[in-house]
Image: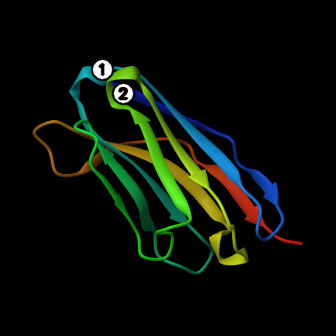
Amino acid sequence: QVQLVESGGGLVQPGGSLRLSCAASGSIFSLNVMAWFRLAPGKERELVASLTRGGVTNYAASVKGRFTISGDIAQNMVYLQMNSLKPEDTAVYYCAAIDSGSTLYGHWGQGTQVTVSS
């Protein structure tokens, strides 16, 4: 079993920055991909950024150039540095992970609220 715990959300003004953290515990040796999703009211869940065990990253077009995913799956931690935040980035951000041998995000954290407002 894998547990994911997010932290670092909060209220920030437009143009500001936040860093989210995701700590993994349990059967972490089985994880192959870790990612950040977000869910805003009235919108569909969006894959924001992902990181593979081999270090390959991928970003949604809406955050490319502003957000950076980093960390080391083998070291149990993944981060999302969010710069130049916009009101439309307001959402609950979730950490998720894929087991090796799977193509589905089968592990999810509880989410952390990010609010961008003046």
* In this view, 62 is above or below 12: below
Q: CA distance from mark 2 to mark 1?
A: 5 Å
Name the residue carrying label 1: 27
Q: Which residue is mark 2?
A: 2
Label 1 sits on a secondary structure element that is loop
Labels 2 & 1 near each other (Cβ < 8 A): yes
Which image quadrant is residue 17 in?
Answer: bottom right
Q: Amino acid at mark 2?
A: Val
Left/right placement of residue 69 relative to residue 90 reads left
> Is residue 19 or residue 100 the one in the foreground?
19
Amino acid type assigned to the residue bearing label 1 in the image: Ser
The image shows residue 25 at horizontal and vertical percentages of 42, 21
User: Residue at image x 47%, y 76%?
Assistant: 44
Residue at x 26%, y 48% (from the top left corner)? 56
Vertical comparison of 56 with 90: above or below: above
Outermost residue toward the left in this view? 101
At x 57%, y 55%, the residue is 93
Query: Please, which residue is most extreme toward the front here?
Result: 65
